[in-house]
Image (cartoon, helix red, strand yellow):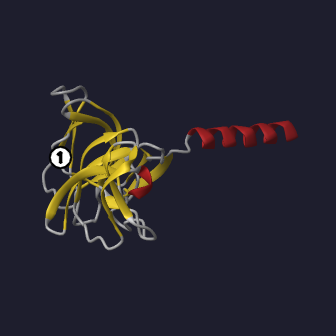
């Protein structure tokens, strides 16, 4: 009897570990229960679809115009912003893992066009905000300031964990590289 109980406990733990990225979701509109795969955090650069972007992001299986696998957009009525992990890139597209900003539910994996307005927030509340001229080169800055008022930061490229950004600061547009420690991919709290 004890052997059977131990076996059941071990089996339960194993199944729980296998499903650690899944949760059960009840959809009150459909009267069904489904399993949802959730996003887990990693060291990849993460960005979000700008809340100002009202268009649809098309997700393709292969670049540049393979089969469309999904259409994504922010649901601003519910405050749900689409998030992206940047996995790969080519000249005009990013290979992404898209997920819900509110629930972490994975929405799609595939290629999106760089022309979609992807954003990031700055994470520099206790130190100077520093933007660099070149990726992985901390010797040449284009901006270093304690008093920054930038709300619209557009991501235009990435290299490793660094993000190439475009933003307007004191009436002038700048393009530079944001190191990982200055990035906040949470549009809800802006990491404050």
Looking at the rendering, in which quadrant would you find the N terminus? Answer: top right
- Residue at the image position 13 percent from the left and 56 percent from the top: 54
The image position of residue 133, as x and y in percent, is 29, 48
Which one is nearer the viewer's eye here, 5 or 43? 43
The image position of residue 16, as x and y in percent, is 61, 43
Q: In the displayed structure, does residue 107 sit left or right of residue 60?
A: right
Which one is nearer the viewer's eye here, 46 or 21? 46
Residue 30's quadrant in the figure? bottom left
User: Image height check: is 126 above or below 136?
Assistant: below
Which one is nearer the viewer's eye here, 189 or 152? 152
Query: Can residue 91 be spotted in the picture?
Result: yes
Q: In the displayed structure, does residue 33 sit left or right of residue 131?
A: right
Residue neighbourhood size for the residue with mark 1, other residues' Cα within 10 Å, grouped as few (<14), some (14–19), many (≥20): some
User: Image height check: is 171 above or below 135?
Assistant: below
The image position of residue 116, as x and y in percent, is 17, 46
The image position of residue 126, as x and y in percent, is 46, 70
- Residue at the image position 66 percent from the left and 38 percent from the top: 14
- Residue at the image position 20 percent from the left and 56 percent from the top: 174
- Residue at the image position 69 percent from the left and 37 percent from the top: 11
Query: Can residue 1 be spotted in the picture?
Result: no
User: Image height check: is 172 above or below 162?
Assistant: below
User: Image height check: is 30 above or below 79?
Assistant: above
Determine whether the residue tagged by mark 1 lies in a helix, strand or loop.
loop
Residue where numbered disc 1 is placed: 116
- Count of numbered marks: 1
Residue extending farthest to the front is: 139
Looking at the rendering, in which quadrant would you find the C terminus? Answer: bottom left
Q: In the displayed structure, does residue 154 sit left or right of residue 10?
A: left
Which one is nearer the viewer's eye here, 31 or 14? 14
Residue 2's quadrant in the figure? top right
């Amino acid at each position: 009897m004890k052997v059977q109980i131990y076996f059941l406990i071990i089996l339960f733990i194993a199944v729980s570990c296998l499903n650690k990225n899944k949760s059960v979701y009840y959809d009150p509109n459909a009267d069904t229960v489904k399993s949802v795969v959730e996003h887990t955090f990693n060291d990849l650069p993460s960005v979000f679809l700008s809340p100002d972007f009202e268009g649809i992001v098309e997700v393709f299986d292969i670049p540049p115009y393979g089969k469309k696998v999904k259409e994504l957009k922010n649901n601003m009525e519910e405050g749900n912003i689409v998030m992206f992990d940047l996995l790969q890139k080519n000249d005009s597209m990013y290979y992404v893992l898209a997920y819900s900003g509110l629930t972490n539910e994975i929405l799609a994996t595939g290629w999106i066009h760089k022309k979609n307005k992807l954003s990031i927030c700055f994470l520099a509340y206790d130190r100077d905000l520093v933007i660099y001229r070149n990726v992985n080169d901390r010797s040449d800055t284009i901006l270093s300031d304690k008093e920054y008022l930038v709300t619209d930061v557009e991501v235009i490229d990435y290299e490793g964990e660094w993000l190439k950004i475009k933003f307007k600061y004191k009436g002038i547009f700048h393009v530079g590289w944001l190191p990982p420690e200055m990035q906040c991919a949470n549009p809800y709290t802006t990491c404050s």
